[in-house]
Image (cartoon, coloured by chain):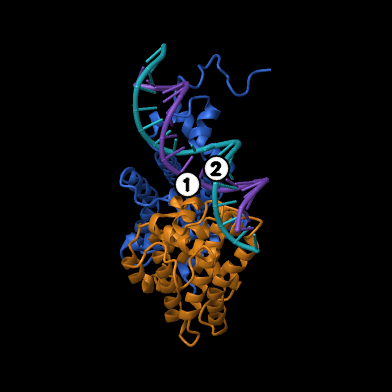
Chain colours: A blue, B orange, C cyan, D purple
Amino acid sequence: MPSEKSESRATRPYHHGDLRSALLASAERTLREKGAGALSLRELARDIGVSHAAPGRHFKDKQALLNALALAGYERLTRGLTAVDDAALPLEPRLIAVARGYLGFATANAELLELMFARKHDPDASEEMAAAVDRAVGTLERIIADAQKRGEIIEGDPAHLTLVVGATLQGAATFAANDLLDARTTLDGVPRLVHLMLHGLKPR
Amino acid sequence: MPSEKSESRATRPYHHGDLRSALLASAERTLREKGAGALSLRELARDIGVSHAAPGRHFKDKQALLNALALAGYERLTRGLTAVDDAALPLEPRLIAVARGYLGFATANAELLELMFARKHDPDASEEMAAAVDRAVGTLERIIADAQKRGEIIEGDPAHLTLVVGATLQGAATFAANDLLDARTTLDGVPRLVHLMLHGLKPR
DNA sequence: ACCTGAACACCGTTCAAGT
DNA sequence: ACCTGAACACCGTTCAAGT
């Protein structure tokens, strides 16, 4: 029976290799399984098999670890959105695709999303973070700008329109992540949601 | 010079009177001033002048305190929304008023709002909580239903339309509470936001 | 009924010291 | 460079005992 916890053979044990990555990976697993509140540096260190002070070499703070987690989340989200975005599509299906992408991410990473949005301007990592947010929002803004160029949506500051569309998606994501909506209902509702954003609530 | 901390005269000192209310009041102040992360039962007890074990008599858990705080938040929000809602108004100004109400609450109580939405189905207080959420959402649903009766907005499940409108407001609130938008910009943008929800992004 | 004091099992963070 | 061990100042929660 091979050891489950130590695996101190062959691939070189943990504690030499790359503690930073190991911490992030373990933290993300804990986040997903037991929630943000249950995340402790000491327990992370225990699971990995290093001393409780070791994480301090790689993250000055618990907050620094959380920031790194959130940052990685934004990067994964942005990659997912750009992968799913197809500029050749007409506006409505194009929006449906990225909305589905975002809401899929939100339901599959509820705890992480909370972390990503639980940031109060930390003067430290807030620069990187703001850039990461901008990249994610950029996907949406490009779609809006493209559609405006083609006359598919009304004129006006694209940043403002992006904010409105983004807010709607963010709100739906919050509802879904907090079980006000279940994942299926949320994803199934995306086409109607997008249609309403485009056509409004007033009768045509 | 009167004592600032003890005021153990006249109105009866803290520790006899109503510790539960005192804890909630102090907790809300801490929440507003230093954030949810900085909230400690022991510090609360210290500030009020009771032993660190005393809070345990009134809240079985730290989470129970947070739940009570969130519940009070929903009640205040609902009162604020119903106070600001005027059924005699036409749809658009009526929606603008309650949207302003909600976003005003969100910017003025950012930390509390996070608490109110940071709930993962706690089988305990989740019943009361769900009811409180329903009351808040009810304000919006009534507006939607009224407007449908008057033919001011399209037909369809009012619960679904409410969800869409609610999501947009919730997303905007999240942006505002996390300084992606400042309070002024948010409130000033409400009429445009509502107009977009009603008329959609497509050119008319 | 309500509160206290002590105790238990945890935390995050720091810092000398080890390799 | 990276990690350890001990130490410090905190936590939340429980429980006998006090009033």
The chain to which mark 2 is attached is A
Mark 2 is surrounded, within 10 Å at the Cα level, by few (under 14), some (14 to 19) or many (20 or more) other residues, namely few
Name which residue lies at 39% across and 55% down: B34
Task: For residue A192, say whether it is visible.
Answer: no
Task: For residue B173, say whether it is visible.
Answer: yes
Name which residue lies at 50% across and 36% down: A27
Query: In the rendered view, does B2 fall on the left or right side of B91?
Result: left
Q: Reply above or below: A5 against A63.
A: above
Query: In the rendered view, does B94 fall on the left or right side of B135?
Result: left
| Residue for badge 1 | A84
Q: Reply above or below: C19 against A51.
A: above
**Quadrant, the N terminus of chain A:** top right
How far apart are the alpha carbons under marks 2 and 1?
33 Å
Which label belongs to residue B201? none
Residue B106 image offset from top left, x and y in percent: 43, 65
The three-letter code of the residue at mark 1 reads: Val
Secondary element under disc 2, as helix, strand or loop, is helix
- B80 or B20: nearer the eye? B20
- A133 or A3: nearer the eye? A3
| Label 2 vs 1, first from the N-terminus | 2
Which label belongs to residue A38? 2
Q: Reply above or below: A173 against A6.
A: below
The three-letter code of the residue at mark 2 reads: Ala
Residue A185 image offset from top left, x and y in percent: 61, 58
